[in-house]
Every structure is written in structure tokens, then in C-alpha cells.
Image (cartoon, coloured by chain):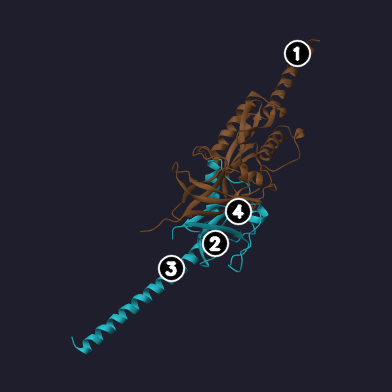
Amino acid sequence: MGTRSRLIAVVVLACLLAVGFASAASALALGDIVKVAGIGWLVTRYGDQIDTFITRSLGEHEAAARGATKVVPILSVGRGAHIGAAQVVGNPENVREVKAVFQVEGRIGSFRPRILVPTISDRVTGNPERAKGVGVSAVIEFTI
Amino acid sequence: MLRRVKLAPILLAVALLAALTAGAAFSSAAISFRGAERDGERVGEVLIGDTAVIVLRTAAAGYLPVERAEIVAGRLRAASEAGFVPQDVEVAPVSGGHALFIGDRIIVTATEAEASAHGAGTAALAQVWRGNIIRAIAPEEAPAAEPAEAPAEPLDLDWTGVAQKWVPIFSLETEGLYLGAAQIAGPTGQVEKVKGVAELRLNFRNVGRVYAYIPVSTISLSRLDRVQGVSVWATGDIGLVGF
């Protein structure tokens, strides 16, 4: 193989690698965009129905929580993206104010805690302020 | 004299007819049930005349709200055919809530789930139903007018709580399977009762999977003794080593 042939092979290989990286990057970004927008849409579209569904299902086991309930998105503090939804429960006036549940993930050795903080904010800014009188009663993973 | 004697049976018959008509005012024909839409949900209503006296929002024991309303209407009808007075309509605590009785007949139970769906306590909801029935059969003896449903009552429960602790999360589907741990929080007395968090997995159509967390006072697969006022703050699991 001559010098010219080697040069052509290197250029072709470089082009293929570049196209491959670009495709992977764009697929990741697109996937994230779809997921973030999709979960927001799913919560808006199905939130009330999921809320009723959970309450009724637990009601059949006589295990429904007393108090007001609502389904809101879960916002990952680490990733800054919507990663699912949560049903929150508590005093009606406080539940009404909740806009999201912030999730903070950690690791202590092999133990992986996941802290769930209902907040009145829908953006990750500084330390999340816990909404008073509200807790989490269910977590929803969307199949998108 | 003869005319008076002839008139007496007629007067007696008229009096009897009037009494029967008054009694029939609360006849079985006046009791009915129906499905209805309230707040975007299908509910079951039990009616006396045109008035909804009991509204059922939740399914129970495999019966939809409207099916429960049919059962309750049947019980109420049977009680009315046997005859009762307002003093016979009572509320008493039963396992899982408060029940409305007519004499020794149970008419309907205000369960925790039903009361929760109304935003009320079980006793308050049952009392509302009692008042509605009395008002329908004897308006002069009824308490002040109330809607068919209990108004949302302020809850004393402090969901954020002052006490916290970690308890195991166990699966309701697979006996003996522990899924990790949950940090729960709430009033001290309530938190002390919690022995674990039951995880119930539910599929919502093809849209998503729900993991419901229920703080319970006994670790049992057959009965969920939910501890009210306690909620989950955090969950945790042990990371497995990958190969």
C-alpha cells in the first residue's frame, strides 16, 4: 500500500469516527430533550388520572392516605432534569403549592440514599426548600 | 242516628288512608341509586326522592362506587320496609372506620379510603350521611342542612413531622423480599408505630409504573395497617457489585 493509499484510509477512518461521535452526541441530546419535555407533558396529561388511580388502588386495600394528594414531576438536582413523577400527600393548602419533588442522590459506601424533597419551586436553584406539611407517597416511572 | 253510624266507617277509612299515605312518603319506591359525575370522577349516589343522601367515591371489595351505591340503596330500602324512626339512625365505630346503622342493620361504612376521598374523617363523613337521611325522612328533626359529602376538614396531621427513622421497605408482591430502606417522618407518636414501608407496584396503562409507599404498623402481606400522618422522605438501597 502506497503513501497515498494510507492517507486515504486514515482520512476515511477519521471521517467515520467523526460521524459516529456526532451521531451519538446528537442521539443523547435528543433523548434527553424528549425525556424532559415528555415527562412534563405526561404529568400535565395524566397527573390527575394517575393521582386518582393511586388513591383508588390503595383504597381497595383500605390503605389510602388521608389528606390531599397531587402528582408532580421529580426533578433530579444532580442532572437538572425531570426523571419521573411523584404523588405527594399532606395538608390541602400545602399540597396545592407544591410544584415538584427534588431528588438528591448520594452514596455512602455501598448504600445509595435517594432523598425526595417536595418543593414549591419547579427549578433547581440553590438548596431546595421543603414544602411544609407534605410528604411523598408514591413514585412514578414513565415508560418512554 | 243511622246516618252517623254509616259515616263512622267512612271516616275511619279516610283516616287509615291518610295514615298509610303518610307512611308511604318514605316508601321503598323513594329510595334509588345512580352513577354520576362529580369533580371529573364517576361516583355512586344513593337518593331518597331526588336528594342524594350518600355519595360514594371509592371502590371497595371489588365493587365500583355505583355498585356499592346499589348495595347501600338495597339495605336502606330493606330498613325502610321494616320501618324506622330518626332515632334509629346512628353512627358507631367499626373496624376500619365508622358505620351508619339503622337499628342493628349496617347500612354503609365510611372507611379510611372513602373518608380520604372526601377529604374528611370517617366519623365526620358517617355523621354527614346520617344527617342527610334524617333530613330526608323527618326534616323537622334533622340538624342544619349539609351537602351530601362531608366538607374538607383541616387535617391535624403533620406530614413533615418532628421525628424520623429508617425502616425496611418490603414488597407486597413477593413474600419475604426486602427492597431496601426508607426514611419516614411525621409526628413522634405516629413514627414510633411504623415497622416498615410496604411497596405496592401498580401499572398505569402503558404509561408508567407506580411504586406506592405505605408506612405500616405491621409487616403483613394480607393486611395494610397504614399509619396516617407519616410520609416517606428518602429511600435507599444497597448497590450490587457488577461483574
Q: Mark 4, chain letter? A: A
Q: Residue tagged by mark 2? A: A104
Q: Mark 3, chain letter? A: A
Mark 1 and mark 4: span between their CA atoms?
Answer: 79 Å
Query: Counting other residues with Cα less than 10 Å from the Cα at mark 1, is it few (<14), some (14-19), or many (20 or more)?
Result: few
**Hue of chain B?**
brown
The chain coloured cyan in the image = A
**Quarter occupied by the N terminus of chain B:** top right
Q: Residue B35, how many percent across, how many down?
A: 56, 42
Towards the viewer: B133 or A30: A30
Type of amino acid at the residue the image marks with label 4? Gly
Mark 3 and mark 2: span between their CA atoms?
Answer: 22 Å
Q: Of tags 1 and 4, which is closer to the observer?
A: 4
Query: Counting other residues with Cα less than 10 Å from the Cα at mark 4, is it few (<14), some (14-19), or many (20 or more)?
Result: many
Q: Of tags 3 and 2, which is closer to the observer?
A: 2
Q: Is residue B239 above or below residue B107?
A: below
Residue B79 appears anywhere in the view: yes
Residue at 48% of width from left, 43% of height from top? B172
Q: Of tags 3 and 1, which is closer to the observer?
A: 3
Q: Residue B34, how many percent across, how many down?
A: 57, 40
- Residue A135 is labelled as 4
Q: Residue A69, how many percent across, how many down?
A: 60, 52
Mark 4 and mark 2: span between their CA atoms?
Answer: 15 Å
Instruction: Of the two numbered discs 3 and 4 on the same chain, state the one appearing first in sequence.
Output: 3
Q: Are marks 1 and 4 in contact (CB under 8 Å)?
A: no
Element marked by disc 2: strand
Query: Counting other residues with Cα less than 10 Å from the Cα at mark 2, is it few (<14), some (14-19), or many (20 or more)?
Result: some
Q: Residue B43, how many percent across, how many down?
A: 58, 44
Q: Residue tagged by mark 3? A: A31
Type of amino acid at the residue the image marks with label 1? Lys
Q: Mark 1, chain letter? A: B
